[in-house]
Image (cartoon, rainbow, N blue to C red):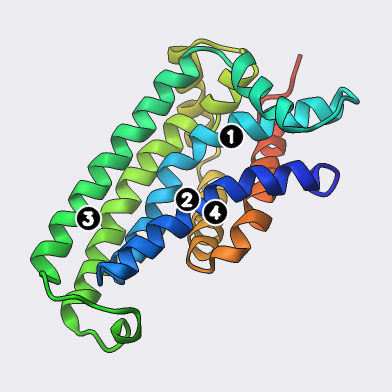
Amino acid sequence: MANATRGTSLAYALIFTLAGLAIIGTLLAQGWAPFIIAAAGAFMLVGPAILAGFFGIAAAHEAGEAAGFAAVSRGFATAANALWALALVCGLLFMIFVTDAAILYAYMVGATPVWLGELLPAGDGVARFVGWSAVSGAVVAFLLFCISAFAVPLLCERRAGLVGAVACSVKVVFGNFMVAMIWALLLSTVVIGSVLLLPLLPLTLPWLAYASRALYREALPLS
């Protein structure tokens, strides 16, 4: 699917890549180089909200229609309204994590600028910040994965309401826990690595989105 819709998929993913570039550039300019790692992890919390666009591209391709940016818009337009409520939950968890990470940064690293060239030898404060922010992010990401992994696709295809979609997602995740956790680990590793190596993101984001769609269809096939 990613190869068949390469142009539109890359262009859509490029939007988020450019946003990431702006955020990383701002952090580097402020001397907050260690916070880039937390920011890369934070992308995992908003990622589910952008899946509707990829679902629109995939649906247009399967229907034999042009998979242009109109398909991206159609993916959001045809999704259940409850998807926006779930997107707000994603945004809330994102803000909670970023606020927590900022507090940890102020406490463990302080106001002294840490530039990119000083990142590795920066000392114990940076290492403790990265460690504790990773723990905080993992807890929030686990909660979000459980409620959104299958809820977002269900809402994109209008197969359930908000409560039913979330309940189904939690049920599927815990009913296939080891497989779900392996997939979650792969998702987080590839996404965070791609954000840190930003030119990779337009290539990996479509692949992960369509792989998530295929996994969802395998777990919850269409009747």
- Local crowd size for mark 2, using a 10 Å CA cut-off: few (<14), some (14–19), many (≥20): few
Task: List the single residue furthest toward the bottom.
Answer: 121
Which amino acid does the dot numbered 1 rest on? Leu
Check the image and report above or below for 134 versus 54.
Answer: below
Instruction: Tell me the kind of residue under disc 2.
Output: Ala
Q: Is residue 146 above or below residue 20?
A: above
In the rendered image, the quadrant that contains the C terminus is: top right
Badge number at residue 17: 4
Q: Quadrant of residue 147?
A: top left
Query: What numbered label is drawn on residue 51?
Result: 1
Q: Position of residue 125 (x, y in %)?
A: 16, 76
Front in this rendered view, residue 191 or 197: 197
Give the secondary structure at mark 3. Answer: helix
Task: Report whether 190 appears left or right of 98.
Answer: right
- Disc 2 to disc 4: CB gap under 8 Å: yes
* 157 horizontally vs 186: left or right: right
Q: Are marks 3 and 2 in contact (CB under 8 Å)?
A: no
Determine the CA span between mark 2 and mark 4: 5 Å
Expressed as whole percent of the image width and height from the top left, the position of residue 3 reads 83, 49
Say which mark, if any, is on residue 32. none
